[in-house]
Amino acid sequence: MARAVTLIRSTDLSDVAEYAYAATAPADARLIFLAGACPLNEDGSTAAIGDYAGQARKAVANMRTALAAAGASLQDVIKTRVLVASTRREDLVTAWQVVRDAFADHDVPSTLIGVTVLGYDNQLVEIEAVAAVLDA
């Protein structure tokens, strides 16, 4: 299946980052803008309270569900922003590792941000994403 997203890497930039530095999609691609994927259970309660990795896993699972409803998958994501409610770099890295592992070799351009608070009670992680697909 042809994909709309092309990941761009540069040998002139550090290879320490665990993501591509840019991505493109052709003009005829359909863009999908996802609301922030939150670690919420179906009943609206917050999953994995106090657990950065657990909340990242639930947010990724919810993002997969939203993508599927739009006719896309993680492989169609062109950009992410991972928000983590913490001032500790270790907590950001814990959440990031879960997100990075979920995307595997589709290492989309991403931004990891520590924030003071997120919208739901006990929420520690949120993942914003944009995807691009080619409609048949």
Image (cartoon, helix red, strand yellow):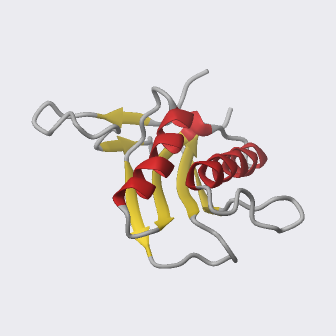
**6 vs 80, nearest the viewer:** 80
Going 63% across and 62% down the picture, which residue do you hit?
Answer: 50
Pick the quarter of the image with the C terminus: top right
As drawn, 103 above or below 21: above
Number of marks in the image?
A: 0
Picture coordinates of residue 51 (x, y %)?
61, 56
Residue that lies at the very extreme toward the left in this rendered image: 12
Q: Is residue 129 above or below residue 118?
A: above
Q: Quadrant of residue 73?
A: top right
Residue at (50% x, 29% y) in the render = 104
Residue 90 in picture, x, y percent from top left: 39, 54
Which residue is located at x 81 percent, y 67 percent? 45
In-image side of 16 versus 49 (left or right): left
| Residue 85: image location, x then y, percent | 50, 69
The answer to which quarter of the image holds residue 33 is bottom right
Front-most of 9 and 115?
115
Spot occupied by residue 53 in the image (x, y as percentages of width and height): 58, 48
Whether residue 52 is visible = yes
User: Which quadrant: the N terminus?
Assistant: top right
The residue nearer to you, when weighing 74 against 61, is 61
